[in-house]
Image (cartoon, helix red, strand yellow):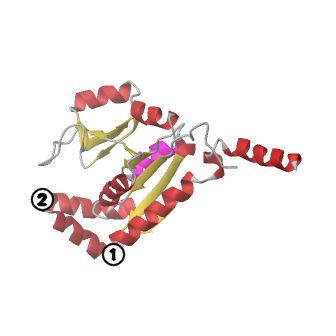
Amino acid sequence: MTMTQSHPRRGLLLILSSPSGAGKSTLARRLMAWDTTLRFSVSATTRAPRPGEEDGREYYFKTREAFGAMVQSGDMLEHAEVFGNFYGSPRGPVEQAMKVGRDTLFDIDWQGGQQIRNSALGRDVVSIFVLPPSIAELESRLRGRAQDSEEVIAGRMAKSQSEISHWAEYDYVIVNRDIDNAFNELTTILEAERLRRDRQPALADFVRGLNREFEAR
């Protein structure tokens, strides 16, 4: 007898957070390539696009007025102001993915993660915080990206201590000493969470079938 899943499990919400430069975005990209069934939650933002970014791919780029209207109408699952710009996760696509059993990956900061964990969808959240191996390495990675001015780098470093202070609010913590090891830990977490008993709605029927086999012996 083999187990079949007649009803898809409810999709989970996988949240990745870290201080800037710790590696969450790199891990998110690798995870999306590793499992093409994952849906990436494209955030809306009021910041200007960086070179090479496209609307609807990296972010939905919004004016402050349009972003505010989405918040007021309840179309944002979470939102926050970071470094003078607003970021948020549109609600509709996330809820639709959950209904058909697709997992959604969030690359967001601790403020957004906290809002989602405290929302009606909180029971479906798996949250992971990514730490750097050292503060010196964190600064080195920020400078190595060559995307931000000295002023922006200084601002990100100043905020890192506050961001790291929220590590204990997360279900799991990964120290990104080596990106390959960190990625292996990330995929292990996701695979284990998908196998949780309460995420397998067909399991009870399967066990009842096993009991019927016992009774028929």
- Quarter where residue 86 is shown: top left
99 lies above or below 51: above
Left or right of 196: which side holds 131?
left
Report which quarter residue 81 is drawn in. top left
Which segment is the magenta one? 110-118
Disc ID at residue 149:
2
Residue 30: x %, y % from top left: 33, 58
Q: Which residue is mark 1?
A: 134
Q: Is residue 56 visible?
A: yes
The picture places residue 206, in percent across and down from the top left corner, at 71, 45
In this rendering, the answer to whether 215 lies above or below 147 is above
Main SS, magenta region, reads helix
Any magenta on residue 115?
A: yes
**For the residue marked with disc 2, what is the amino acid?**
Ser
In the rendered structure, the answer to whether residue 17 lies left or right of residue 207 reads left
Q: In this rendering, is residue 174 above or below 33?
A: below
The residue at the point 45 percent across, 32 percent down is 96
Determine whether, in the image, residue 216 is placed left or right of residue 7. Answer: right
**Residue sitting at the far front:** 217
Q: Secondary structure at mark 1?
A: loop
Asked whether residue 170 appears in the rendered view, the answer is no
Residue 83 in picture, x, y percent from top left: 25, 49
Q: Which mark is residue 119?
A: none
User: Badges 2 and 1: C-beta atoms under 8 Å apart?
Assistant: no
Q: Which residue occupies the foreground of this view, 108 or 162?
A: 108
Where is residue 168? Give x, y as percent: 50, 62
Residue at the location (76% across, 44% down)?
Answer: 209
